[in-house]
Image (cartoon, grey):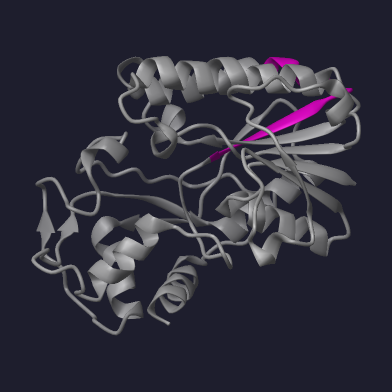
Amino acid sequence: MKTLIIGGTGLIGAETARLMNSHGHEVTLMSRNSTTNPALSQYKHIAHDYIHDDISTDVLDKFDWLVFSAAADIRMLPEGHDEETFFMHANTDRVPYFFEKAAQSKIKKAVYIGTWYPVVAPDKIQTSSYVRSRFEADRLLRQYSSPEFEIVCLDAPYVIGQFPGIETPHLEGLTMYAAGKLEGVPLIAPAGGVNHISSLSVAEAVYGGFLNGEPGKAYLIGDENLSWKEYFELFCEAVGNSQDLVITEDAHPMMPDIILYAGRNATVSYEPENGDLNYGRNRIKETIQNIVSSYMN
């Protein structure tokens, strides 16, 4: 199938492109800017900023399938901008608009990468503009699902991975932290824990969504439930600096409160949905080893 991946130059998008290409699909990437990443040079690319620019059905008519992996998060918030104004425009207005245009085109199926927060921390829908914007985007875009345009949503937890040419500063930072290379920053673990999933597993869930997903449904995907202590210690082990980390309930230098939408010290644990999607699991330790290897070498 001719597949358009929005956010195709990011970690999830690139991993999905590689997987779908391996299954014989013709992949085109779409992102705000063109990419010079050699690992993505085999794919066609369309420069388009969905937040600010309208999309023509003439562009979308060329494709059979759509992957949307580009909803706005805290990393995209422009300095000095109001969070609620930005997130509600980018996610609640512009993401459903894109799906409305896709529904008017010749695209037959779409998979949307959402977030787990509205599901696992529903109280944050009222108190966090980001969580509310993602909740509303998911609700509104699924209204366009129909027999002619089937939409499957994947609500993903913390996604980690390594792809050639794509920088993941927070994972590089954790690698350096675990190796003791951040001078004056003590090795400790935050209290609580969450579910993690690899970018490869997300890509497989996307592909499973196209093949077997129930149209109009949102799947709560994930892989392993880990305490932050267990997660940080996996990084320490991978860099050759095994630790039995002390747990702190104070703000953590590597996990600031601004990214902990479920709350500091919260534990979010669940059994992910997988049956229809058939994605691989139990990959977190291996994924962390690959991440560490890419940055330490």
Residue at image location 64% in from the left, 18% down from the top: 96
Q: Residue 291, located in which quarter of the rendered image?
A: bottom left
* Left or right: residue 262 compared with residue 282: left
Q: Residue 241, located in which quarter of the rendered image?
A: bottom left
Q: Residue 52, located in which quarter of the rendered image?
A: top right
Q: In this view, does 26 lie above or below 95?
A: below
x and y percentages locating residue 147 in the rendered image: 87, 22
- Is 144 colored magenta in this rendering? yes
Q: Is residue 43 above or below residue 137?
A: below
Q: Magenta residues?
A: 142-155
* Left or right: residue 236 compared with residue 117: left
Residue at image location 37% in from the left, 17% down from the top: 84
Whether residue 260 is visible here, answered yes or no, is no
x and y percentages locating residue 107 in the rendered image: 86, 30
Residue at image location 67% in from the left, 29% down from the top: 217
> In the image shown, does 283 or 5 lie closer to the viewer?
5
x and y percentages locating residue 295 in the rendered image: 41, 74
x and y percentages locating residue 247 in the rendered image: 13, 58
Q: In this view, does 80 lie above or below 17?
A: above
> In the image shown, does 171 or 288 lie closer to the viewer?
171
- Is 48 colored magenta in this rendering? no
